[in-house]
Amino acid sequence: MDLRDTPAEAELRKELRGWLEANWREGMSQQEWFAVLADSGWAAPLWPQEYGGRGASASEAIIFNQERQAIGAEPPPRGIGVPMAGPTIIQHGTEQQKQRFLAPMLRGEEVWCQLFSEPGAGSDLAAIATKAERDGDEWVINGQKVWTTHAQLARWGILMARHDPSLPKHQGITYFICDMHAEGVEIVPLKEMTGEAIFNEVFLSDVRISDDLRVGQLGEGWKVSMTTLANERMALGLGGLGGTAAGAPVDLAEADAESSLETMGKFIARGPHALVELTKRAGLAEDPLTRQRLAKVYTMYEVNRFTGYRITTALMKGQGPGVEASTGKLAYNQLVRAVADYLIHLSGAGAIGAPDDDKLMKTAERLNLVVPATSIYGGTDQIQRNIISERVLGMPKEPRGDAEIPFSEIRKGAA
Ligand SMILES: Cc1cc2nc3c(=O)[nH]c(=O)nc-3n(C[C@H](O)[C@H](O)[C@H](O)COP(=O)(O)OP(=O)(O)OC[C@H]3O[C@@H](n4cnc5c(N)ncnc54)[C@H](O)[C@@H]3O)c2cc1C
C-alpha cells in the first residue's frame, strides 16, 4: 500500500495537530478530556454525526489516532462501551436506546461490561446457557457469566442469553442490555496472578430486564453479537496504531499507577527503542548473546509493523479487518511474549518476586505475569490459527456437528 497522505489527508493531519495542541493540556482530568472529545465528535469518529460521532472514514480515524499519539494525548473512553456496545446499539438498537445510552458512553460517564463468556462457553460462544424467560413486558434472566472485565465498575452490560433451547444453538439467543445495579446481579472478583482483580464472575439470579432493553429481534442475538465482535476486532486493529509514542523515553516508574495490561500495552507501543535503552542501562549492550536476542525481538517488532499496515490497508479500503486481524493478533501475542522474555533476560532471576524499588525487575515481572492473557482474550491463539487455516490456507473446516440440532439435545461437556 501507499502510506503517504493524499493532499486531503495531509490537510486534515495539519488541522488535527493544531486542534489537539489547542485542546489537550498535560494534567487535565480524564473527565474534562473525554468531554472535549465527545463535544467534537472525536471520541468516536466512525459513528454517525447524529449520534455524537463525525461519520469519518477509517483513514481519518487512523490519522486522528496517530496525531493524538504523537502529542501524547490520552485516548477516548475505551473498554467495552465506545468500541463495542456503542456500534452495536447504533446498528441494531431502538431510537430510544440510542438516545439513552450513547451520549453518557461517549463522555465516559457510564462504564460498560460484556456479559458473553460463561464457564461452558468461551471459544464456542454459541454454547451459552444463561436463560432468558419472558414474563409480560419483562425478561427474567438466570445464569452465570465469567471473565467479565470491569463488571465491578460497570453501570450497564451487554448480555447474551438463551430464550429458546429447543432451537439450534445459534438461533435461540437474544441480546439485551443489563442494568448492573439491578436486583439479582452478583459480582464476584477473580484475583489474577498479577495480584489485580480486573475480571469477575457475574451471577444472574432472577434479574428482570424490561423488553425495552432487548437489542435486535427475538432470536437475533447471535447476529447482533457478531456486530459486537467485529467491532472488537476493529478496535484491536486500530488500537495497535495508537498507544504511547514509539521512541518515547522509558520511564518505568509510571507503571506503578496502571494495571499490568496497560503497562504491557504502553511498553510494547514504545517500540524496540525502549529495549535498546534498557539493554544499555543493564550494561549488556556489548554482550553477543544479548545482541542476538535483541535482534530477534527487533525483527518481531518489524513483522508487527508490516502486519499493522495490512490491517490499516483493509480498514482504509472500508473492509473490516478480517483474517488480517487474526494474523495481526497472533504476531502481536508472539511479540509480547518475546519482549517479556527479553526483560527477564535483562533483569535475571531477581524479576521473580521483584522488589518494588527496582523498576526494571518489577516491569519484567508484571509483563511476564500478564502476557498469557493476550493469547486468550478476543479469541485464543488456537482459534486465530483455525481461522487462518480455514480462510487463508484453505484447509478443511472443523467438524461442527452440533450446529443444526436443538440446543437442549446437545450433550453438554462433549467436544
Ligand atoms: C484478560 C481477559 C479479559 C476477558 N474479558 C472478557 C469480558 O469482558 N467478557 C467476556 O464475555 N469474556 C471475557 N474474556 C473471556 C474470553 O473471551 C475467553 O476466555 C476466550 O473466549 C476463551 O474462552 P475460554 O476461556 O472458555 O476457553 P475455552 O474456549 O474453553 O478454550 C480452552 C482451550 O481450548 C482451546 N480451544 C477451544 N476450542 C478450540 C478449537 N475449536 N480448536 C482448537 N483449540 C480450541 C482454546 O484455544 C484454549 O486453549 C476475557 C478473557 C481474558 C483473558
Image (cartoon, rainbow, N blue to C red):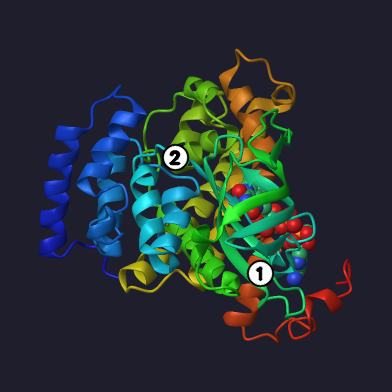
Q: Nearer the viewer, residue 322 or 198?
A: 198
Task: Check the image and name the residue furthest to the top.
Answer: 357
Residue 391 in view in this figure? yes
Where is residue 157? Give x, y as percent: 56, 49
User: Real-space Cα distance between discs 1 and 2?
Assistant: 35 Å
Q: Pointer 1: what residue?
A: 385
Q: Is residue 38 left or right of residue 332?
A: left
In the depicted structure, whether residue 272 falls above or below residue 45? above
Q: Secondary structure at mark 2?
A: loop
Q: Nearer the viewer, residue 74 or 345?
A: 74
Where is residue 319? Give x, y as percent: 38, 74
Q: Is residue 245 left or right of residue 381?
A: left
- Cβ of mark 1 under 8 Å from ligand 1: the answer is yes
- Give the position of the N terminus as an image quadrant: bottom left
Q: Quarter of the picture for ligand 1?
A: bottom right
Q: Pointer 2: what residue?
A: 110
The structure residue drawn at horizontal position 64% and vertical position 31%, both measured from the top left corner, is 366
Q: Amino acid at mark 2?
A: Glu
Q: Earlier in the sequence, mark 1 or mark 2?
A: 2
In the depicted structure, whether residue 113 falls above or below residue 128? above
Where is residue 308? Give x, y as percent: 43, 60
Q: Nearer the viewer, residue 308 or 72?
A: 72
Where is residue 7? Give x, y as percent: 10, 63
Report if the CB atoms under discs 1 and 2 are less than 8 Å apart.
no
The structure residue drawn at horizontal position 63% and vertical position 61%, both measured from the top left corner, is 160
Q: Within the image, what quadrant is residue 96 found in?
A: bottom left
The structure residue drawn at horizontal position 79% and vertical position 60%, both measured from the top left corner, is 120
